[in-house]
Every structure is written in C-alpha cells, then in structure tokens.
Amino acid sequence: MSHSVQNPGIPYVGTIPNGLQDGMKIHVSGTPEHHHNGFQISLQAGGSINPRSDCAFIFNPRFTENQVVRNSLQSGSWGTEERHGSFPFGRGRYCDVTIHVKPHHYSVSVNGQHYCNYNHRIQKHRVTHISVEQGIRVNSIRFDTVGGGGAGGYPGSSSYPSSDGHPMYNPPVPFIQNVGHMHPSKMIFISGIPHANPSRFSIYLQQGSQHEPHEIAMCFDARFSFGKDRNIVVQNHKQGNWGSEERKVPYFPFQPNNHFEMIILVESYCFKIAVNNQHLVEFNHRIQPLNRTDTLRIDGDVSLTQVRFQG
C-alpha cells in the first residue's frame, strides 16, 4: 500500500500509517531553502516537538558544516552522533530522501543512491510519528509498505524504478526520453511542479522522438488558462490528424507552484492515469499494436522533479 501527504506546511508532524514496520519505505521529497542552514527529518515515539518526544532516528543535513548528523533522543538525552559520509545536498536543489526500515537498522538513500545505515536504538514498534522541520519546502511525504498495491488498481509507488535502475532527477523541459515499447503493466511515474502562472503543460506517449511524429498514442494536456479553458484534454494524433478530444475528468488536480505525482499505467485496453494517488482518467487505446509507442515527451509550463519508468 502507498499513502502520501502532498505539499505539507513546515514544521510538519504526522502519524505514520499503521505504524513503523519492516520493509516500509518513507520518502521525503523537497527543496532545501536558500536562507536556512539545514533541515531535519525525525521518526518519533509521539507527536510532540516542544518538548520533543523520544526520537528513534533524526536525519539532520547541516549546510554550515557540510555534514549530515544522525542521532536518537531518549528521555530528553541525546545519544552519540553519527556524521560520516559525504554531503549530497544543496540549497535550492531538489532532493529525495528514502528511509527503508530493516530488521536491525534504517537504510537511507538520497536521490536513489545509498547513503548510510543507522542501527536501531529505540524499538521500532514505539515509533508512531514523523516530523519534518526547518529549512525545506516539502513536496511530498510518501509511505510505501510491502505486499500491497496502490489505489484504484495501481501498483504501490515503491515499484517504480527507471529502466536503468535510477530515477531521473530535475530533468529539463522539454523532456524527451525513449522508455521502451508500450505493453500491459508498463508504468511511468512523473513528478513535477507547475509554474507560478501556467497556461498549460502536455505529456505525450508517441512513436519516436520527433516533435511532430507520425503517431501520438496519447496526449495528456493540462490546461490552466488556455484561452477560457481550464480542463484536462486527452486525445491522440494519427496519420496527420488529431483524434476527438476527451474532457470528462472528475476534477482538476493541478495547482500552480504545487507539487504533483502522476502515474501512467498501461493496460491491455487503455492508459490509466492517477494524480496524487487518486485515479483521474482512462484513455482507451486508439493506436495498435501498443509496441509502436516508445517515447515519452513532456513540454509546457512545468518543472520536472523526477521521472521514473518500469517495464
């Protein structure tokens, strides 16, 4: 199962769904602020930050020292700090911190690369809350647990590596990438932030990398203020002509300057699209066979923070 919190205010304190358990992955993604000296992620036995509850694990990048300090707090007393390792963070630079709960330690990755292990000092079953504080603008906090799928038939987000095993962070827009041939169960995961005053952005699944290819299996067009239009328009392009537009979406899921996460799941009969872990729309295939489509293209008024794909 996957549960996420989008664009929370800072400081953020929230419960960990169903408590901490082996195999759980906690993803915190965001951008450190330019005018702060660091930020802190804490796994806590309680929801208080003043006075602070016992903390099983504190992960504290400090820009003034170019070090990441790890520690625990029990009964008001700090333990021994751990500081070894590089400093993979930058002010104003998007980052993704993943904490993987193991039987004897936490395994931490930064931007898809293993960073450190931290042995348990407080029993896992006591941990009930996560807090994120200080100088970071958080896009999302996501909890992935083992053995379940996501909402609406979408697999859990933890199963979204890119084809080479590493996500693509902060890729430029326009974005064009060969993602391999389409087939049922293929998944594409896109996260980004619409610009402050967006008109539109578009996501294409197409044949080849040309700007105007012969075939576009799906064009997902998010229109904020395109003329008088504020809607999602989904259509295809075949033999030089655009197909009929589909506009029946239950809601408009995007906001300027607000982070989003999108999943495109390829089914045998359609593309299924979810935004922020909520099903949005299905678009039946109009171009067959599926394997003619092999390229993802994204352009318009959006900054991408991460693109991943599987299959």
Image: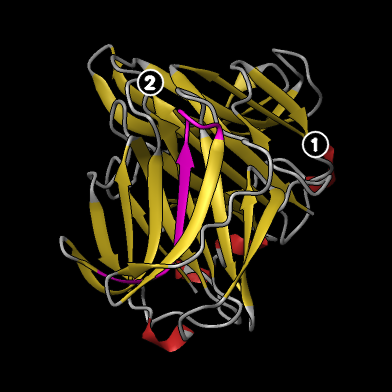
Q: Quadrant of residue 130?
A: bottom left
Residue 65: where, in percent of width, then height?
A: 51, 32
Q: How far apart in space, not on screen, are marks 1 and 2 (Cα)? A: 39 Å
Q: Is residue 19 depicted above or below 27 in this figure?
A: below
Q: Which class describes the residues within 10 Å of circle 2: few (<14), some (14-19), or many (20+)?
A: few
What scheme was used to colour the molecule?
Answer: secondary structure
SS class of the residue under badge 2? loop
Q: Which mark is residue 294?
A: 1
- What are the residue bounds of the magenta stretch? 53-66
Q: Which mark is residue 90?
A: none
Q: Quadrant of residue 257?
A: top left
What residue appears at the point 68 percent right and 45 percent down from the top-left corner? 85
Q: Is residue 33 depicted above or below 59 in this figure?
A: above
Q: Is residue 71 left or right of residue 10?
A: right
What residue appears at the point 23 percent right and 48 percent down from the top-left corner? 11
Q: Amino acid at mark 1?
A: Asp
Q: Amino acid at mark 2?
A: His
Decide whether the magenta segment is chiefly helix, strand or loop.
strand
Q: Which residue is mark 2?
A: 34
Residue 106: where, in percent of width, then height?
A: 59, 69
Q: Is residue 123 depicted above or below 286 in this figure?
A: below
Task: Answer with mark 1 or mark 2, whichever residue precedes in sequence.
Answer: 2
